Image (spheres, rainbow, N blue to C red):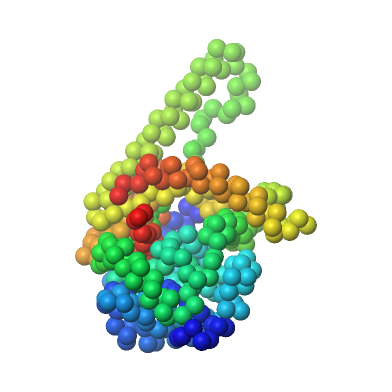
């Protein structure tokens, strides 16, 4: 990743003139990080459980890593983590466990974000 | 679109202010549909028609688990928002915000008018940059840890102490570098948000992410910001700076708690 970062650093100087919308994001990982969990939340008529989307983010980041990077990096710990693989218990049980984990992680993350948010 | 058709609904991408209809004419939305505008006073909701068999409650639950479906939806969501954000102040909505018909969309604009106006005031004339600062993993010191076996206890502890001090000095110098970068960027930004550091196992970066921040940068500062980031990227070999942008102000589109 540090190589990729170096390239992106070099690219900054080439990007002129700048439009407000920017170039199309290159990878799925980039666009998911940009879009998921972001934007104004106003309840529509279709109830989407926002927590489901948060869960999705975690699952997808794992999946994106597994597709893009994990194998070349030799990372496969998630394959053996029963919380992160869909077993015979099915999606419902998996979601219940992930929900608990998200609640736990969010408890920590929120504090950090509030404390350091400088707006 | 009216409530008569119960097999379709309106997908809400963004709320803009003063968006001209010509800005949405050539943009293809989800399901190959055209974009439409639903107006309330100076606010314009950018919407398109989606089938409920794909975007209804049950279907969404299923589709959100489908990576290919999600990728396509997220990409179109982002394309639409990027297209309109170039033409008018734009507040992106959360993915999959869906109302049954235009009347329901307009009711949301009416109900949230003041709050949406505040958001648009904040982000008008600005774009977002993401900047991540990663400290490279520490180089192993000249002493190999295995050589500790031949040391006596006192030497071993002394060496441990020296290593701990060196590590602490390095950590604080890296934190200093990150805060120097953040302090410099904040001067050109209208607002900033510090986001939680990404987990390296998930994002794949090596080393420690010491800063993950989003900056809301006014249009007139875009080039100065890009130049500053580029300079900061090369100015410090303790850290690697990954910057991306500009893009629509996703991280700054949020309603204040009522």
**Residue at (56% x, 44% y) in the render:** A104
The residue depicted at 42 percent of the width and 34 percent of the height is B171
Residue at the outermost left position? B220
Decide which of B247, B30 is in the foreground and name it: B30
In the image, is residue B74 above or below residue A94? below
Percent x, y of residue B6? 55, 83
Q: Nearer the viewer, residue B21 or B138?
A: B21
Task: Let me know if residue B91 appears in the view.
Answer: no
Q: Name the residue at 53% across, 73% down.
A: B73
Q: Nearer the viewer, residue A46 or A14?
A: A46
Q: Is residue A83 left or right of residue B22?
A: right
Compared across the picture, whether B229 is left or right of B32 comes to left
Q: Which residue is found at the position 57% from the left and 59% from the top?
A: A52
Q: How many marks?
A: 0
Q: Is A24 located above or below residue B208 in the figure?
A: below
Horizontal and vertical percent position of residue B215: 32, 56
Q: Quadrant of residue A85?
A: bottom right
Q: Work out whether residue A70 or residue B159 is closer to the camera in this orientation and state it.
A: A70
Q: Position of residue A112 (x, y in %)?
A: 43, 42
Res. B121 image quadrant = bottom left
Specify whether residue A48 is in view: yes
- Residue A92 falls in which quadrant of the image? bottom right
Q: Height in image: B180 above or below A3?
A: above
Rendering coords of residue B30 (x, y %): 50, 80
In the shown orientation, is residue B57 left or right of residue B129? right
């Amino acid at each position: 990743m540090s190589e990729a970062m170096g390239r992106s650093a070099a690219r900054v100087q080439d990007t002129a003139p700048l439009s407000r919308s920017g170039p199309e994001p290159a990878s799925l990982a980039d666009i998911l990080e940009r879009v998921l969990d972001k934007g104004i939340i106003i309840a529509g008529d279709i109830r989407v459980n926002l927590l489901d989307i948060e869960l999705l983010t975690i699952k997808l980041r794992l999946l994106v890593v597994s597709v893009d990077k994990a194998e070349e990096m030799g990372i496969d710990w998630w394959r053996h983590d029963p919380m992160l693989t869909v077993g015979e218990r099915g999606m419902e049980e998996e979601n219940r466990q992930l929900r608990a984990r998200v609640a736990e992680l969010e408890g920590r993350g929120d504090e950090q974000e509030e404390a350091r948010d400088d707006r | 679109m009216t409530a008569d058709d119960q097999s379709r609904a309106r997908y809400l991408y963004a709320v803009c202010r003063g968006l001209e209809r010509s800005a949405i004419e050539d943009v293809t939305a989800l399901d190959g549909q055209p974009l439409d505008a639903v107006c309330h006073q100076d606010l314009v909701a950018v919407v398109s028609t989606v089938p409920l068999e794909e975007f209804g409650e049950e279907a969404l639950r299923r589709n959100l688990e489908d990576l290919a479906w999600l990728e396509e939806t997220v990409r179109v969501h982002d394309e639409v928002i990027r297209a309109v954000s170039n033409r008018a102040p734009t507040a992106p909505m959360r993915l999959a915000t869906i109302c049954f018909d235009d009347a329901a969309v307009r009711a949301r604009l009416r109900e949230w008018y003041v709050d949406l106006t505040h958001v648009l005031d904040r982000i008008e004339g600005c774009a977002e940059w993401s900047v991540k600062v990663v400290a490279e993993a520490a180089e192993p010191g000249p002493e190999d840890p295995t050589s500790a076996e031949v040391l006596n206890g006192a030497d071993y502890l002394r060496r441990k102490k020296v290593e701990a001090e060196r590590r602490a000095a390095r950590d604080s110098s890296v934190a200093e570098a990150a805060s120097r970068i953040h302090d410099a960027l904040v001067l050109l930004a209208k607002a900033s948000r510090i986001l939680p550091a990404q987990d390296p196992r998930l994002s794949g970066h090596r080393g420690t992410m010491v800063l993950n921040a989003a900056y809301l940068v006014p249009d007139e500062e875009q080039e100065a910001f890009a130049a500053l980031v580029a300079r900061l990227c090369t100015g410090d070999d303790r850290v690697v700076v990954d910057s991306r942008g500009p893009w629509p102000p996703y991280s700054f589109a949020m309603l204040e708690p009522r």
